[in-house]
Image (tube, rainbow, N blue to C red):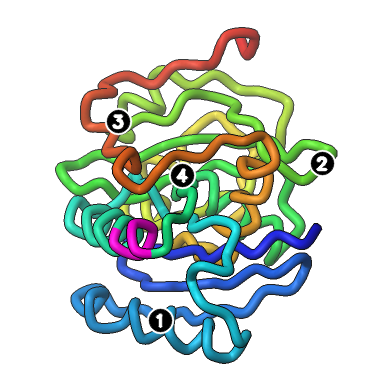
Amino acid sequence: MTDKILAIDTATEKCSVALLIGDKVTTRSELAPRDHTKKVLPMVDELLKEAGLTLSELDALAFAQGPGSFTGVRICIGIAQGLGFGADLPMIGVSTLKAMAQGAYREQGATAVASAIDARMSEVYWGRYIREDNGDWASFDAECVIPPATLVEQMEQDQHSWFTAGTGWDAYQDTLTSLPLALTASAVNYPEAQDIAFLAQFELAKGNTVSADQASPVYLRDTVAWKKLPGRE
């Protein structure tokens, strides 16, 4: 059976929409930090018309659940819920940090990615991911929001060579480049809906969906310290 998944992302400065049908993806993407509400629905309409589909014919609607801009994440959730309610679609939230890991693999073949989004207030949204054999990604440490200097103090060297992704690396370059890690810069600064759609396939296969009224954002502001996941010590 061929999955048909629509994905929406407005969590950062980039606005993007993607339609995944089996192994074929079509996408619209634009850097438009203040025009998400104007751009996203026309993008959705274009992709559905090109594919000759209606919302009700989709298998799921995926959305960027954060972290990211507070306003951008809320816009994404609101639009996704509106579309999901109207078509009674199962919803799949995907981490923006994880989506950037998939973007780095798509762009440069990265299999170990350290994602950092500028969270303002002298902090970054942080998470690291290792690509699994099936194409999904495993979290290497827990997603959090943390001052870069604190991250440097707590970080230990490991055996991986990490590709970097996200705006945090440029925003806090002087601090983050002193991490005791082998780092390679990627071309990925923002999450993309096509990567959210790709990752949503794994969640759909596992039945990890919610109804539109249960779709919720992830802000990470309550997570104040970086920590490794169990078994990663």
x, y percent for residue 130: 68, 35
Q: Earlier in the sequence, mark 1 or mark 4?
A: 1
Q: Tell me, yes or no, if residue 187 can be seen here.
A: no
Left or right: 215 in relation to 105 = left
Q: State the residue in front, 111 or 28.
A: 28
Asked whether disc 1 touches disc 2, contact meaning CB atoms under 8 Å apart, the reply is no
Q: Label 2's element?
A: loop
Asked whether disc 3 touches disc 4, contact meaning CB atoms under 8 Å apart, the reply is no
Q: Is residue 84 magenta?
A: yes
Q: Label 3's element?
A: strand
Residue 45's place in the image compared with 95, above or below, is: below
Q: Quadrant of the C terminus?
A: top right
Amino acid type of the residue that numbered disc 1 sits on in the rendered structure: Glu
Instruction: Write down the residue under mark 1.
Output: 30
Residue 19's place in the image compared with 124, above or below, is: below
Extreme residue toward the right, this view:
133
Instruction: Write down the residue under mark 4.
Output: 95
Mark 4 → mark 2, Cα distance in angstroms: 18 Å
Asked whether disc 4 touches disc 2, contact meaning CB atoms under 8 Å apart, the reply is no
Mark 1 → mark 4, Cα distance in angstroms: 19 Å
Amino acid type of the residue that numbered disc 4 sits on in the rendered structure: Ser
Q: Residue at x 48, y 35 (%)?
A: 127
Instruction: Write down the residue under mark 3.
Output: 146
